[in-house]
Amino acid sequence: MSRVGASVCTVARWSAALAFTLIAVVPPAFGDGPYPVVVERNVQAKMRDGVILRADVYRPDKDGKFPVLLERTPYNKNGDGGTFGRVAAARGYVVIIQDVRGRYTSEGEWYTFKHESDDGYDTVEWAAALPYSDGKVGMFGGSYVGATQMLTAIAHPPHLAGICPVVTASNYHDGWTYQGGAFEQWFNESWTSGLAQDTLDHKVQSATNALEGMEKLPLTSYPLFNFDPAQATSLGNLAPYFIDWLRHPGYDDYWKQWSIEEHYPDIQVPTYVVAAWYDIFQGGSLRNYLGITGHGGSEAARSKSRLLVVIGGHAGGGPKIGDVDFGKQSVVDENEVMLRWYDWLFKGEDNELAHEKPVKLFVMGRNEWREESAWPPADARPTAYYLHSAGHANSLDGDGTLSTSTSGSDTADHFTYDPANPVPTVGGPLCCDGQHLAPGAFDQRKLESRPDVLVYTTPAFDRDYEVTGPVTLDLYASSSAVDTDFTAKLVDVGPDGFARNLTEGIVRARYRDSQENPQTMQPGNVYKFHIDLWATSNVFLAGHTLRLEVSSSNFPRFDRNLNTGQPAGESANFVKADNSVYHDQAHPSALRIDVVGP
């Protein structure tokens, strides 16, 4: 995997800022370009409020002016960015890698998302005015480094001319911190733990036990932060944003101030969006492409933007993602992709970007690349698969099926969701601790043996069957509780029974109609839930079946719903929920997919 993807979860120690600029010259043999490279360390840029941010600059050792490629990172500019900086500078770019505010060598206080629009604007304009800059600035990077691009772009600095956000979100509430109203517990706690360790080092605090609570996050106990006062104070000092995330479970003004989705008309530059199957920000990446091409603030943004969908993202760089090998052709050098993007956009090179269709995606199953004129593919046919059973869809031994025929007088399925015994997470879109919980594609049969997992399966396909596009589930359900979750997972089952997860989603019942105005349920009432499973591109090969899993937990990827309607950050009380799924004529629960080809 390239440094763009690999750096997203890097946890490195802070090193003291140098008070001077160190300059070195690297011979051209280092890269594949014609220029020797000058490296300048800790170059200072003053923000509008006087805070100094520091960057390393890699530039051609030649008179003249060159386009600038800027990365603004919280993951340490002294990490593995030097290799890319030298290679790109040897090819005629000025590469600037900057520590964002409050991280490593830069001044100020670190708080997620808060300063990225203003600091991004100021840094772009500072970079454009450097004596060796030609005035065009492009940005690059993945995950939070993609967020620094998106937040800069919506501020539209005059000299920003392009961005290349890799595997990043469109909304930092839904699709980053929460999904469908559920707290992204595994990601939030593992990512924040690394950030807090760096902050501890940055603050040079002597009390090493201040991070004890963050190192041993209470994945098995609730409230989510049931610390003693001393630990709570330390946590608030190290990661105040995490406390604020818990205090704002709904989509309120705290989140709206940073929402990319509400500002697509403010993005005025061409954008190369890189998304990934099995990536934790896949849904947001696809929404960014659609939002910019549909509503971008300039003709260039709408017509020149591109989408590349790879395999892995935060789940790994392939070819093996989890337990599945997708073939050596699946591996992409994202750095080279990005350089070719800017070769075309900034230098006018007649490369493949000038001739390819705007969408290029990796099709799983056949494990091959394909170009499309649009996302979803223009020839994709929306198709509904209706849930069926005689009331016993529980587990692989049940009678749940999927069919394109509508439901008749089917009997509802029932299961008990016990927060003390949640359905465990097995693979899927995870970040940022693969050592303890591996992301990607894994066999789901162990989960499907549980009675609290409803299993609905098609007959085996007699020929290859491609599903490419968004995946959603309309689910009619009720509960004995005032609040609960409903989860869904799309699975490809081979003739040998191997059940490979493709994509998944969740909805917290009290947010079923609005993430701004939660409403608890009336126990026993039937409600319609819409579950967004994001998207996939997969060929179900002949002999394979398509499967849907429905349950009420996916832990610890998402926090457990305690079924009481109380926030998990504040309460430890829980009750069991008797949940029912309906699929009769009056309640046509249906999986909705896009089918390509015969």
Image (cartoon, rainbow, N blue to C red):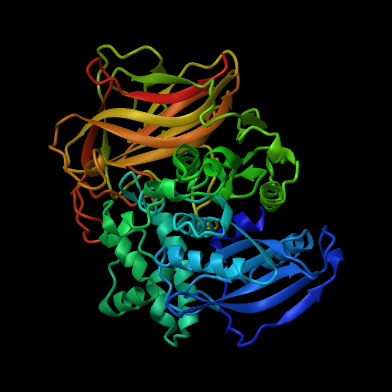
Q: Measured along the vertical axis of the image, is residue 43 above or below residue 79?
A: below
Residue 403 pos. (x, y %): 41, 15
- Horizontal placement of 200 versus 237: left or right? right
- Horizontal placement of 353 versus 545: left or right? right
**To which quarter of the image does residue 583 belong?**
top left
Residue 476 pos. (x, y %): 26, 27
**To which quarter of the image does residue 435 belong?**
bottom right
One can see residue 224 in this view: no
Closest to the observer: 417 or 41?
A: 41
One can see residue 16 in this view: yes
Residue 42 pos. (x, y %): 62, 79
- Horizontal placement of 207 versus 88: left or right? left
Task: Give the quarter of the figure containing the C terminus.
Answer: top right
Closest to the observer: 354 or 10?
A: 354
Residue 488 pos. (x, y %): 38, 35
Q: Measured along the vertical axis of the image, is residue 518 above or below residue 498?
A: below
